[in-house]
Image (spheres, rainbow, N blue to C red):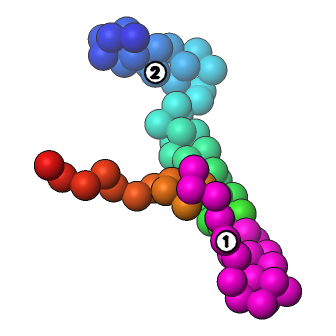
Amino acid sequence: MQTGQRDRMKYLFREILGVDVDRIVKQVVAKVSVDRAKQVQKNSTEWKKYMSEEGGVVLLPANVAGIGRRSPKR
């Protein structure tokens, strides 16, 4: 959607429905961020529990161990 069309749609939503699209988007983004942060905290807690049960050492397969690593510069 082009900028002009986007602004027109925001105007129509605000004038006809009384809805501020930007405010709603900010609220949704904030809600998603909070939910993700809670999930990360839960995953971290579960991972610590799992690591302690396994004795602190877990061997991961190569395809999992390399996730998120940067490839070496050439």
Residue 24 appears in view: yes
| Secondary structure at numbered mark 2 | helix
Q: Nearer the viewer, residue 28 or 70?
A: 70
Which quadrant would the N terminus be assigned to in this image? top left
Q: Earlier in the sequence, mark 2 or mark 1?
A: 2
Magenta highlight on residue 38: no
Quick check: 55 above or below 17? below
Q: Residues within 10 Å of mark 1 (few under 14, many from 20)?
A: few
| Secondary structure at numbered mark 1 | loop
Q: Is residue 55 left or right of residue 18?
A: right
Residue at position x 57%, y 56% in the image: 62
Q: Amino acid at mark 1?
A: Leu
Quick check: 70 above or below 37? above
Q: Residues within 10 Å of mark 2 (few under 14, many from 20)?
A: some
Q: Is residue 12 left or right of residue 36?
A: left
Residue at position x 65%, y 64% in the image: 60
Q: Is residue 70 left or right of residue 74?
A: right
Circle 2 residue: 10
Mark toward the viewer: 2 or 1: 1
Tell me which segment is drawn in magenta.
41-63
Q: Are marks 2 and 1 in contact (CB under 8 Å)?
A: no
Q: Quadrant of residue 39?
A: bottom right
Q: Nearer the viewer, residue 3 or 38?
A: 38
Q: Amino acid at mark 2?
A: Lys
Residue at position x 55%, y 19% in the image: 13
Magenta highlight on residue 55: yes
Residue 27 appears in view: no
- What's the CA distance linking mark 2 and mark 1? 52 Å
Q: Nearer the viewer, residue 43 or 33?
A: 43
Quick check: 60 above or below 56? above
Label at residue 59: 1
